[in-house]
Image (cartoon, rainbow, N blue to C red):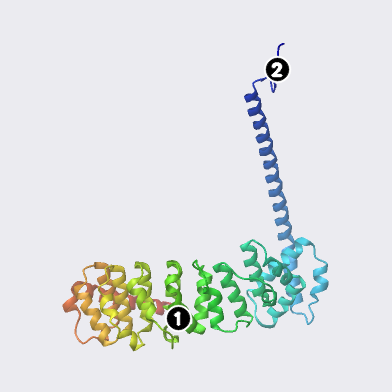
Amino acid sequence: MGASVVGLTAFGYNDPTVVILVGIALVVGLLLTVSFYLTIGLSVYRSVKKSRREQVKPELRSELIERLFLDTPRWNEWVEGLTAVEREVVETLLDEHLRELEGIEAETLRSLGDTLGIPERAARRLHTGNEYARLGALTWLTLLHRSEPCLESSFEPETPRERAAVVTLLQQTDRLPDGETGISILLDGIDAQFSVFGQDTLYRLARMDPAPLLRTASEEYDDWPEPLLGQVLAVCAHLETSVREGGLTWLTAVLETGNEATRVEAAGALASFGWRSEIREQPFVGRAVRDPSPLVRAAVYEMLASWGDETALTTLRRALVEEANPRALTVGTRALVVRRDSLETEPSVQLGDAWTWSVEQAQYDRLARRAQSAQERS
């Protein structure tokens, strides 16, 4: 009894493999066509929406400014009559003006933010899975000076950017209890470096009260990733005489045991603390000028020159006499030139051309600054 075989046919092909490939090609072609028209449609929609926004923006800006200076701006009745596109434009204008205005005008604008329902929406976005949305929500709450939606929620900042945004919000609204709390939010359990904004937040917080940062660094610096440690060291380099208390032995430990980059940063940080005699008298200085890295030695030379006391300058001059690396020697001599009036003998006898060149550069810099100042005054 013979078997009957029914063949598949497509565009004249009856080979099953060819039929399957043709089918796949049709599906892919259809998907590409749909994707093309969706992309074109979305582009047209966005273009029309952008054009509409630009058309209504001047009128809405004028209306906002006019109401801002009324005794009663009556935001409610204005907002109720706005379309969805107009509300978006008004929120954009609100963001823009809140970054520029202060005082009564800024507070009046913040009430417009309340009318638009921004704090409530920001509170909901704090619990989304999108970091960008959470940062946007924290930014709005900071601009509006509304910390309650954040404080009353269960939101816990996770990323370095979120930590910095929360600290900024609490600072701007006077809801940060103390520097210890701020440093805890920024650094507890952190395993990544900050953005520029985050590092600036850390700096502003440390300037208010450096002791919590120094205590935290002393306990945790060894567990931080090297980029984060470098950022903390850079902040410490600008604290200077605001540091009245707090241990600095962790800085000397980094200078002796860190990698090349962090040793350089540690020397820069220690340069700011020369007024503390217990730092200048420690034996690590003699070891630091013999560091195997020319980059680190150069940073140490600048540190010693910044300290400027007799012992530090004597140590610096002796180290430069033995310095074989041209770059480190140049950096050291230029730093020493700044302290020339403090020297008892002429260093050119020992430092030769490097000293002469550094003196000439310093004189040129002074003349250039004088010429620029004279030009600015005229």
Provide residue 119's location: percent of width, then percent of height.
72, 72
**Mark 1, residue position:** 214
Residue drawn at x 64%, y 21% as measured from the top left: 15
Provide residue 73's location: percent of width, then percent of height.
78, 77
- Label whose residue precedes the other's in the sequence (2 or 1): 2
- Is residue 270 depicted above or below 118 in this figure? below
Q: Looking at the image, can residue 187 be seen?
A: yes
Residue farthest toward the top in the current orientation of the protein: 1
Residue drawn at x 26%, y 87% as measured from the top left: 310
Amino acid type shown at disc 2: Val
Residue count near mark 1 (Cα–Cα under 10 Å), binned few <14, some 14–19, many ≥20: many
Callout count: 2
Residue 358 is drawn in which quadrant? bottom left
- Is residue 245 depicted above or below 48 in this figure? below
Residue farthest toward the left in the current orientation of the protein: 349
Quadrant the N terminus occupies: top right
Amino acid type shown at disc 1: Leu
**Mark 2, residue position:** 5
Residue drawn at x 40%, y 76% as measured from the top left: 372
